[in-house]
Every structure is written in C-alpha cells, then in structure tokens.
Amino acid sequence: MKYEGRVFLTLFSLILNISFLFLVFKLERLFTMDTLLYLLVTAILSWLLGYQYDKVKYYSYVDHLTKCYNRSFIEKKFSKIGTPIQPLGFKSKKMVVYFFDVDHFKHINDRFGHHSGDKILQVLASIIIEMFSDRGYVVRWGGDEFAVFLPVDQSMDIDTIQNYIEYRLRNFILDENISFTVSVGQAVFPDEGKGLKELMQIADQNMYMAKNRRLLRKESME
C-alpha cells in the first residue's frame, strides 16, 4: 500500500495550519507549546485520514480473493499518457504479457463446488505472485484467468513457466484431492500489439493454441 494519501494530506494540513497560525499570531507565538501540540494533533489526524484514503484506493485495485491486482488497475496504468512501458515503470523498451488459464475450470466448479474453485484460484495466484511479483505486475484478469506484465529482460521461457507451475501444483493437496492444470500464452509489446486489448487477445489466442497442443499430446500418450 502506497503512502500518497497520508503524505499529501499531512503535508497539506501542516502547511495550511502553519500559514493560518502565522497570520493570526505572527512569528513570536507560532512555536509555543500550545501551537506545537495543535500542529501535532492535526498532523496525526491528517495521517489517519490519509491512511483510510490509501487503504480504500489500494483495495479498489486489488482482487480480495487472490491478492493480485485487478483488471481496473492495469487498465488505468495503460490509459496514462505515453507507452505502456512508461506508466508501468519498466525501463525496457519491450514488455511481455503472460496469460494464464485453469483448464476445465467450469467442470471443477460444477463437480466440487465454488469453494474448491476459489481455493484453486488462490493456490495458482500464490504461485504466480511468488514467481513474478518482484519483477512486474500480477493481475487477476477475470474468473480463472490471470495476466502477468513484465519487462522483456525479466521474461521467462513459456515451457519453463509451464513446467515450474506443474511442479509446484504437485505439492498442493486440496481437501478433495483435486488435481488441475494450467495453460499459458504470451504476447510481446509492441511487436504483437500496442494496446492492452490487442495484447490480451494475442496472449489469449496463444494460450488456447498451447492448451490444444498439450491436450493433443496428452491424448496421443494415453
């Protein structure tokens, strides 16, 4: 959670109150015990009010179930002036978007219930956050879909990501002993798209192509 609201409101309150006290009492009475106590109290109250603002703002951009950023957060980042690289704070000239999807998620929800579906989303989110949160932005795009935005110099090979996630999933045992798999696709800015919608469409298409290849390979091995 950032400190924007707390810092701004506290500084604004101090500047406003010091200016008011200076106009009323002049300099000789500006730093008496009473005025200093008054400034301290107003600074604390401003800090607490700013904390509430920062808290509301933070949770408006974070998915409560998975603790990932939500779609509104990344859409706001992309809407800022300049290329997506600039608002996201990446120094790289290119960016990679990974798109994750839980295979047969609707079937899992229908068979085991939404509680189990939520648990699966939390498990997957924790793995993705552990892998990528210190490199870029992890976003719950919607439903069982997640997106990761990284500078290209922090990117990873799709097969490496797929293998690692499958390895980590084997270490998780849900209450109902549910097993599930995840498919991954990617798109690169600006090579494959310059807007968020276009990038996500390409990443989604690549994810489904990868999903189909994996399913066909699995069927051929059975």
Image: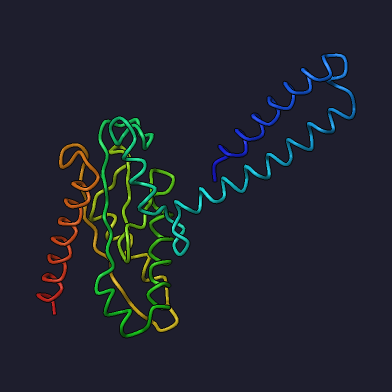
Please name the residue shown 41% across and 70% down the image: 171
Q: Nearer the viewer, residue 163 or 68?
A: 68
Q: Position of residue 8 (x, y in %)?
A: 60, 33
Q: Which quadrant of the view contains residue 25?
A: top right
Residue ranking furthest to the front: 24
Is residue 152 left or right of 54 when viewed as pictured?
left
User: In this rendering, is residue 222 above or below 63?
Assistant: below
Q: Position of residue 160 (x, y in %)?
A: 27, 54
Q: Which quadrant of the view contains residue 111?
A: bottom left
Q: Position of residue 13 (x, y in %)?
A: 68, 31
Q: Nearer the viewer, residue 22 or 98?
A: 22
Please name the residue shown 37% across and 75% down the image: 117
Question: Coloring scheme of the render?
Answer: rainbow
Please name the residue shown 74% across and 23% down the image: 20
Please name the residue shown 16% across and 61% down the image: 210
Q: Where is the C terminus found, in terms of image quarters?
A: bottom left
Is residue 193 left or right of 165 when viewed as pictured?
left
User: In this rendering, is residue 46 above or below 15?
Assistant: below
Is residue 218 left or right of 39 when viewed as pictured?
left
